[in-house]
Every structure is written in structure tokens, then in C-alpha cells.
Image: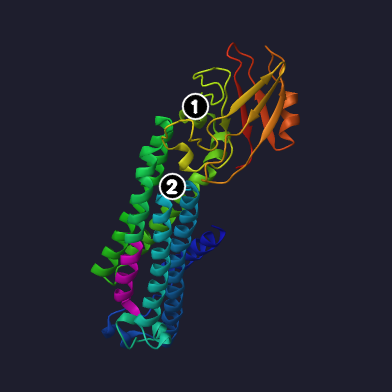
């Protein structure tokens, strides 16, 4: 993402230079006789900046796609959709290579990109490259939306959270719209500079969509109204596989409140004695004033992180702020709630 931000910064800088500069080698040929030597040198310089801006735009978009695919791989851990994510990743890689080859081969020799006048219209209009780049870019965006939105719709999370996530990822549709409008303005009128505005809009929105899911927990910490609008997923009582009882309020769940939980843990599953979704249920052995929380058996999906925690319980009391601070120093925060149901939550500060 730092690399994508670097390319994005280069894009904005280059577009401002082109807009404020003396032009490029894109001009009606009848105007050539009116140019002075200084104007020709300025247009050569502008043409080189255009090459950098095109590379900055291409790499900004594809570095962002790579970051999104890494996130999709984490979210689909243990799901059959992960195979589709891998296939899309291969397609995106081919799209980047194809777009780069299209750019390099569209104008030969390469230095003709800044020649005044250009020997080939493709060295200045970039129409063939624009068509190839748009084909790979838009199709891969559509595939990425097609795999993620259904997963979010099926996710077993609160309605407010679901709406917020779907709305966030649906911003990708604006990225696709901006990509289409960029090529429409570019190909319909090669002398228009309107396409540069849509370059910025496409790249900027893509940066927002790719980064907001990662910084969302931070935003919820900073802004109280976001915590109220999208409360975290509550712990739910599962089956006690040792006693066969159901709905015992003393039974607790592992709540990864600050971790990164794959959608395979959020999707709807059937609970039975042979199936233990990782990170969703626990068994508690109660002995006098101590309880032992045991992670369920590993079911072959995700990452196995077996944890056994001994907790000394003083019934009817809650942990103080000092206790929480002391526990937080060790990476994990234990919060005890001494209500009638004797409900306990274990929150891990790290993904397990």
C-alpha cells in the first residue's frame, strides 16, 4: 500500500504538471509550423511527463488490486471462494503484464513517445493501449466485486455492520464507472483533458476503498458514533459438547474483538458434535472458584491456535480499570462481567 501511495502521489503531481505546462506532442499537425524551438522543447518535456503519469496510473490501480486480493485471501480463509480469489489474482497479474506490454509495444521506437511531431498517432493518442488497459482493468474489478459482495450478504453479522461493509465495497462500482468515463472522454476526443480529472477520481476512490476496511477498527476507536452505529458482533452461546446442554448462560465464546477474523468464521454454519467452527465456541470446565476455558478441536480449516486459560473468579465482582491495564500490557485483555448469568468474554488483541 505504501508503494501504491507513492505511485498515486506521482500521478497527481504529473497531471498537475501536464495541466499547467506547455502541452505535449498531442496537437493537430497543422500547428507545428507555429511552434518556436522553446515551445517544441516544452512539449517534449510534457510528453515525457505524460509517459510517467500513464505508468503512475497503471501501477496505482494494480498495486491497489494486489492489496485488495491479499485482504480477500484472508477473508476467504477456509472457504471454497478462496480458489476463485487465487484465479482472479492470476488474471490480475496477467492484466498488469498485458497492459505494460501494450504500452511498450504500441509505439516503436519507444523514444517516439516524446518525438515532436510523432511518427505514429499511437505514440500520442495511446488509443490502442487505452482499450487494452481498460479491458483488463474493468473486467478484473467486476470479478473482484462479484466474489466479495455475495460473501458479505451471506455473512452472519449484525445488519448495521453488513450494510456498512456492503456500502463500503460497493464504492468499487464508482471506481469502475470512473474507469469507463476516463476512456470515454479519452477516446471520444483525443485533444480533451477531461480524462485527467477522471484519472484522479478513479485512483482516489480506489485508495479509499482499499484502505477503509483496514483502518475501520481505528476509526471506531476514535469516533464514538461509529461504535454505536456499527456495534461489534456479540458473543453467542453455543452447545456444551461435554454435557449436551444448550443455552447455558455460563458458556462463553472466544471474541476476537481486535483481531482479523476470516469470513469463514462469520458465515452461517450448523453446530453439531462433529463440527467445531474455530473461534466461535468454547467449553468451560468449572471447578470451585476457577474456570478453565478450552478451545475446541481443530477442524482442518484456518490456523490452529490452541489456548488454555485458568481464571480465578470472584463471583459478583468485575475487574477494575487497573486490572484491565495490567492485563493489556501482556497483549490480552480479560474482562469479567459479574452479572446474574456469570458471563465472561475473552478478547484477544492479536489474530490467532
- Quarter of the figure with residue 160: top left
Q: Position of residue 4 (x, y in %)?
A: 51, 61
Going from the N terminus, do you reach mark 1 or mark 2 first? Answer: 2
Q: Which mark is residue 177?
A: none
The C terminus - image quarter: top right
Q: Residue at x 34, y 86 (%)?
A: 118
* Location of mark 2 (residue): 79
- Front residue (pair 260, 224): 260
Position of residue 188 measured from the top left corner of the image (x, y, whole percent): 23, 68
Residue occupying image coordinates x 69% and y 31%: 309
Q: Residue 228 carries which label?
A: 1
- For the question of whether residue 26 can be seen, the reply is no
Q: How many labels does the image show?
A: 2
Q: Which quadrant would residue 122 be assigned to in this image?
A: bottom left
Which SS class for mark 1? helix
Give the magenta range: 124-138
Where is residue 177? Give x, y as percent.
31, 55
Residue drawn at the location 59% of the way across and 19% of the way down: 343
Q: Does the magenta stretch include residue 137?
A: yes
Q: Which of 276 and 94 is in front in this view?
A: 276
The one of 66 and 227 positioned closer to us in this rendering: 66
| Mark closer to the observer (1, 2) | 2
Residue in front for this viewpoint, 248 or 210: 248
Secondary structure at numbered mark 2: loop
Amino acid at each position: 500500500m505504501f508503494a501504491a501511495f507513492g505511485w498515486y502521489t506521482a500521478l497527481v503531481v504529473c497531471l498537475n504538471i501536464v495541466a499547467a505546462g506547455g502541452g505535449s506532442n498531442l496537437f493537430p499537425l497543422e500547428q507545428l509550423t507555429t511552434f518556436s524551438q522553446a515551445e517544441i522543447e516544452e512539449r517534449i518535456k510534457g510528453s515525457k511527463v505524460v509517459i510517467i503519469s500513464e505508468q503512475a496510473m497503471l501501477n496505482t490501480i494494480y498495486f491497489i488490486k494486489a492489496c485488495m486480493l491479499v485482504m480477500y485471501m484472508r477473508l476467504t480463509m477456509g472457504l471454497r471462494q478462496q480458489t476463485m480469489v487465487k484465479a482472479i489474482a492470476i488474471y490480475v497479474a496477467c492484466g498488469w503484464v498485458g497492459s505494460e506490454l501494450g504500452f511498450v509495444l504500441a509505439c516503436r521506437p519507444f523514444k517516439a513517445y516524446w518525438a515532436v511531431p510523432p511518427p505514429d498517432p499511437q505514440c500520442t493518442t495511446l488509443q490502442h493501449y487505452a482499450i487494452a488497459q481498460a479491458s483488463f482493468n474493468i473486467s478484473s474489478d467486476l470479478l473482484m466485486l462479484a466474489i466479495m459482495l455475495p460473501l458479505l450478504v451471506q455473512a452472519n453479522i449484525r445488519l448495521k455492520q453488513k450494510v456498512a461493509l456492503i456500502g463500503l465495497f460497493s464504492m468499487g462500482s464508482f471506481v469502475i464507472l470512473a474507469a469507463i468515463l476516463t476512456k470515454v472522454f479519452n477516446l471520444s476526443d483525443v485533444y480533451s483533458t477531461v480524462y485527467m480529472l477522471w484519472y484522479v477520481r478513479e485512483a482516489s476512490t480506489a485508495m479509499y476503498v482499499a484502505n477503509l476496511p483496514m483502518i475501520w477498527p481505528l476509526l471506531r476507536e476514535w469516533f464514538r458514533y461509529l461504535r454505536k452505529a456499527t456495534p461489534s458482533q456479540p458473543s453467542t452461546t453455543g452447545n456444551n459438547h461435554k454435557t449436551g446442554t444448550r443455552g447455558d448462560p455460563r458458556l462463553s465464546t472466544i471474541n476476537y474483538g481486535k483481531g482479523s477474523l476470516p469470513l469463514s468464521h462469520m458465515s452461517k454454519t450448523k453446530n453439531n458434535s462433529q463440527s467445531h467452527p474455530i473461534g466461535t465456541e468454547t467449553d468451560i470446565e468449572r471447578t470451585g472458584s476457577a474456570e478453565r476455558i478450552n478451545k475446541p478441536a481443530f477442524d482442518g480449516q484456518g490456523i490452529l491456535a490452541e489456548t488454555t486459560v485458568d481464571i480465578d473468579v470472584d463471583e459478583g465482582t468485575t475487574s477494575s480499570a487497573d486490572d484491565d491495564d495490567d492485563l493489556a500490557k501482556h497483549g490480552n485483555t480479560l474482562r469479567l462481567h459479574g452479572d446474574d448469568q456469570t458471563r465472561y468474554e475473552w478478547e484477544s488483541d492479536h489474530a490467532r
